[in-house]
Amino acid sequence: MPDIVEIIKEQHRQVEELLTRAEKGDGDSAALMQEVARLLLPHSEAEEAFVYPTIRDLATEAGDEVKDGAVEHHQVEEMLQNLLRGDSDDPGYDGTVAAIAGELRHHVREEEEELLPILTERLDDTAREEMGRRFIEATTGEDLPSGGDHEATRRELYDKARDQEIPGRSRMNKQELADAVGES
């Protein structure tokens, strides 16, 4: 199973892909931003619930960066909630999408350069994998086995669906993804 750092970075890439599409007008912007919210809100909650506290415990010197990360989460969430209450035809909609994307890119860069390396450097592989399992459960609602052979996770099925360019994959549940990629 991938460790927590790999999982967080993968979720960052998924959000980035959606934001880029929304900025380019590649698809229904409102639906893309709904998907950003669906992925981002549990991601931020899980980071604040147990990833950031672990980082703070491992490196007290990172306390200010951890606080900044949580503040950035809340700023983006507020902008996103305001955006979702409106309509994609509203004046300023595209500017708000661009502002959200800019803030998220800044946040991701800082998190990946300053905070996540602390986990890589100061937690062993087993601890990072266990935290990764917990993170997937918190962000996707899936119960994962804690070792040995395991059934494909929704994330793994989603990745296969993306590789196979299956349309509508982001709105599919685990069973629908399994059916779509031929693993049911």
Image (tube, helix red, strand yellow):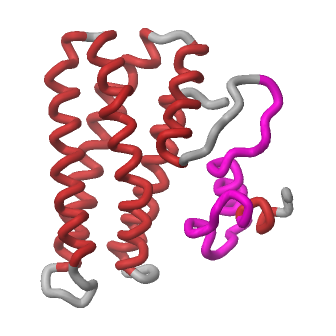
Q: Which residue is drawn at 44% across and 79% down?
A: 26
Q: Which of 61 and 138 is in front in this view?
A: 138
Q: Which residue is drawn at 23% across and 55% down?
A: 77
Q: Is 130 displayed left or right of 31 in the figure?
A: right
Q: Is 136 displayed left or right of 118 in the figure?
A: right
Asked whether residue 51 is drawn in magenta, I would say: no
Q: Which residue is drawn at 39% across and 66% down?
A: 20
Quarter that holds the N terminus: top right
Q: Place residue 90 in its image quadrant.
A: bottom left
Location of residue 6 in the rendering, given as x and y in whole percent from the top left corner: 53, 34
Stretch of the chain drawn in magenta: 148-176
When the figure is inspected, residue 159 is found, relative to residue 98, above or below; the finding is above
The mark tally for this picture is: 0
Q: Place residue 98 in its image quadrant.
A: bottom left
Location of residue 159 in the rendering, given as x and y in whole percent from the top left corner: 65, 54
Asked whether residue 159 is drawn in magenta, I would say: yes
Q: Which residue is drawn at 27% across and 60% down?
A: 101
Location of residue 87 in the rendering, given as x and y in whole percent from the top left corner: 25, 85
Q: Is 172 displayed left or right of 84 in the figure?
A: right
Location of residue 69 in the rendering, given as x and y in whole percent from the top left corner: 22, 36
When the figure is inspected, residue 95 is found, relative to residue 66, above or below; the finding is below
Q: Which of 134 and 31 is in front in this view?
A: 134
Q: Is 99 displayed left or right of 118 in the figure?
A: left
Quarter that holds the C terminus: bottom right
